[in-house]
Structure formats: structure tokens, C-alpha cells
Image (tube, helix red, strand yellow):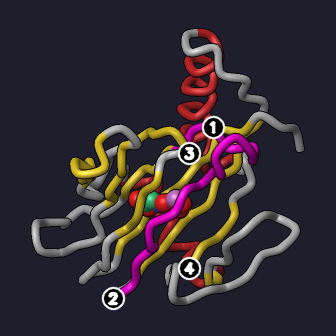
Amino acid sequence: MDALLNYFNIRKTELKPAAIGPRSNKVVNLELRSDAILWLEEDDPELNFYFKLIQSITDILKRDLFLPIRQTETQMAYYTKDQFYDRHRDRHFHSGHRWVTAVYYLNQNWSKGHGGELVIYKDLEPNAPVIIEPISNRLVLFLSELEHEVKVTNVTRKSFTTWFRDDIK
Ligand code: OGA
Ligand code: NI
């Protein structure tokens, strides 16, 4: 959506190298993850329509899948050429507060060979990962406990990432 891409481009100067680990122990590790991120405020009026979408997904996760979602957190992520995010989980098995990860991509001219695909490893079929191309206006949802990675990108790669959590602020 153009409005989200405009928003991303305006706030791009505020991006910082992404840190990993629990909130209390964040470290920047360029061998694991080399993109830059910015945490977003969920009451930002410019993002009203995005957070309405997130709210309707929260409602579905709670009502139809019975997940104990109580809050969400959202960041913008920006990868430039040669950047990546190595294989990881967003939630460690049986601990942690993230249940579901949503990623919304803003890459209008993405084509095969540009790289930066999201690869999700299913626990029961380790040889058959799911490969998702980060094309514009695509929203992907997956369980945060599943291992996944962002392949090295050959072009800039922009996205919004939201996590659905079971704790409160
Ligand atoms: C993450 C992540 C996937 C993507 O930020 O934890 O895995 O496709 N992102 O950007
Ligand atoms: Ni992740």
C-alpha cells in the first residue's frame, strides 16, 4: 500500500541496527542479523489503517483459534544489499510471549533473483521448507515458534513486522 511505503520512507532515517534476544538483554549480532529496525507506536494516527488490520487479526486469533493474545508489538525492518537474518525462532519453544508473527512487505519491484525470501522450516517436514517471496502488499502469518530465516537480499527490502503476544505492556 502506497501510504505505508511513504510512511516507511519518511521514517527511514530513524532506523537503528537490529538487536536480538529478550527485552532485558539485547545485543547487536551482525553474524546473525544485519538489518535495521524501528519500533512503532500503535496509536500513531498515520498507521491507523494498519493497526485496524492488526486488531481484526487479533480478534480472529482469539475468537477462532483460541489463542491468548493480549497485545501486539510492531517494528519496521530495512535490509540493504547483502543483509539477512539467519535461521531463528521468534519465540523459544514453550517459553516466551510471542505466539504469532505477521510480516507485511513493501517491495514493489521485487523479482526472482533479488533474494531476501522468507524461509519457514516446518517441524514435521524439515526437508520441505516454505519459501515466501517478499513482494509488495503480501502479509504472511506464521507461528512464532517455527524456525525461519531471511535469505541474503540483493536489493533493499522493506517490511512491517508485528508480533501477537500473550502478556501485557
Ligand atoms: C523477524 C523475521 C521475517 C521477514 O523479524 O524476526 O524473521 O520476512 N522477519 O522479514
Ligand atoms: Ni523472525
Q: Which residue is mark 4?
A: 36
Q: Quick one: label 2 or label 3, which is nearer the N terminus?
A: 2
Left or right position of 138 against 94: left
Alpha carbon of mark 1 to alpha carbon of mark 2: how far? 29 Å
Left or right position of 136 against 75: left
The amino acid type, in three-letter code, at marker 3 is: Glu
User: Magenta residues, as a range?
Assistant: 81-101
Which of 11/111 is in front? 111
Q: Quick one: label 4 or label 2, which is nearer the N terminus?
A: 4
Question: Which residue occupies 73% across, 23% down?
Answer: 68
Alpha carbon of mark 1 to alpha carbon of mark 3: how far? 7 Å
> Do the CB atoms of the residues marked 4 and 2 lie less than 8 Å apart?
no
Alpha carbon of mark 4 to alpha carbon of mark 1: how far? 23 Å
Check residue 99 in the rendering and tell me which mark sits there, or answer none: 1
Q: Quick one: label 4 or label 3, which is nearer the N terminus?
A: 4
Quadrant location of the C terminus?
top right
Image coordinates of residue 2 in percent, x first then y, are 37, 54
Q: Is residue 51 magenta?
A: no
Alpha carbon of mark 4 to alpha carbon of mark 3: how far? 22 Å
Q: Is residue 146 something that shows in the picture? A: yes
Question: Which residue occupies 50% across, 66% down?
Answer: 8
Q: Which residue is mark 3?
A: 145
Q: Which residue is mark 2?
A: 82
Image coordinates of residue 120 in percent, x first then y, are 36, 51
| Mark 3 residue element | loop
